[in-house]
Amino acid sequence: MACGKLIFEYFPEAAAASMPPAARPNIMTMASRTASIFFILFIVVPPIVIRYNLFSHSALKKSNKDMASLFEKSCYNGCNTIWRRRTMAQRIENIPFAKLINTRDLGGLPAKDGKAIRPQTFLRAASLYQLVPSDGEKLVRDYKVAYDIDLRIDKELSRKPDAPIPGVEYRHYQLREDVMENFERKRGETVGKMMTRMPTMAQLYLNMVSKENSLEALRNIFGLFMEDVVPGEKAALFHCSEGKDRTGIVAALIEDLVGVPRDLMLEDYMLSNDAFEKRNNWYYRGTRLIMNKEAADSFRDMYRANEYMLTDMLDYLEKTYGGTEGFFREALGFSASDVKAFKQKILQ
């Protein structure tokens, strides 16, 4: 009936032509009433019932135990998910700037025990190469940014150095080696064949939490976070070239450490694709002109965020260290008290 109402609203001529004139008002009224009843019963009522505890579970249990259980589970599992996603959709969004893109404040993301990450503590972003003065002023004024943490390699810095921001301290911590540094195309090899030999992005993600050069960078990054960042006063903005992979890993380590639900972590991570959607589509069409679909799909992981890459990395930390907190202690060398104090500082 809801579909019928949509037909009446958007295709009235087509709908009217298929019924007797006398029946048209009645059917339209029926469709409208059915849609209204559906909306009230399944969208409006369940959240109100849960919020104000308007039904007694024990009373329903006496009359129909299975139905009560099903209704309660549907309310909590369905409506709470909708509420949380709707609330977080307002928080997990890119901040508008003149030139700075793919920029988000991690503040507001829910953590364990009903807490949340404090705002004006951590911002993630793409390169600050094209930053204009008004963007820098907004970062300092509205988000209290005091540290610019650049995760890029030296080659990237030489081509596109960060624009300086008055009052913001610049730090460079190279998180990984250039994937193409020792990678060459073989003689007579097609581009498509070459692409199939390249390390996968999933493997590169694992390298960034297992190779010593990256671990040393992470020690420095989180050492600064623990010692110098002050929520609401001295925030850190960390970025790579696009704010997707290296930036995504640092953000995920923060989020997973404090217990941000996995689905919301992935929602934050995947939002990077929105910032580069047009470019990504253009890249894919271009690669399909010079390589087969399999190679083009593989290459697409190089410029798009994909859930499995971050999930595989987090699963690796769980399997190897028992989770992110174990990774901070065993791989990065922070004490249990360091980690505890860090979580207490950045949560509210």
Image (cartoon, grey):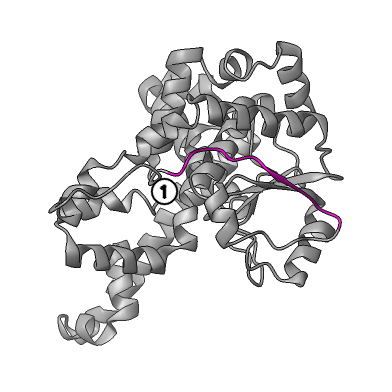
Left or right of 198? Residue 178 is right
Identify the residue at horizontal 46%, vertical 27% (top origin). 314
Location of residue 221 in the rendering, given as x and y in whole percent from the top left corner: 68, 34
**Magenta stretch: includes residue 99:** no
Assign a secondary structure to mark 1. Answer: loop
Q: Which residues are magenta?
A: 167-178
Q: Quadrant of the N terminus?
A: bottom left
Left or right of 98? Residue 33 is left
Q: Nearer the viewer, residue 290 or 36?
A: 290
Left or right of 65? Residue 345 is right
Identify the residue at horizontal 46%, vertical 49% (top origin). 270
Q: Is residue 126 visible?
A: no
Location of residue 207 in the rendering, given as x and y in whole percent from the top left corner: 44, 30
Q: Nearer the viewer, residue 32 or 119?
A: 119
Q: Which residue is mark 1?
A: 305
Q: Nearer the viewer, residue 274 or 62?
A: 274
Which of the 4 quarters of the picture holds residue 341? top right
Q: Amino acid at mark 1?
A: Ala
Left or right of 346? Residue 62 is left
Which of the 4 quarters of the picture holds residue 311? top left
Q: Nearer the viewer, residue 21 or 233?
A: 233
Identify the residue at horizontal 52%, vertical 42% (top origin). 246
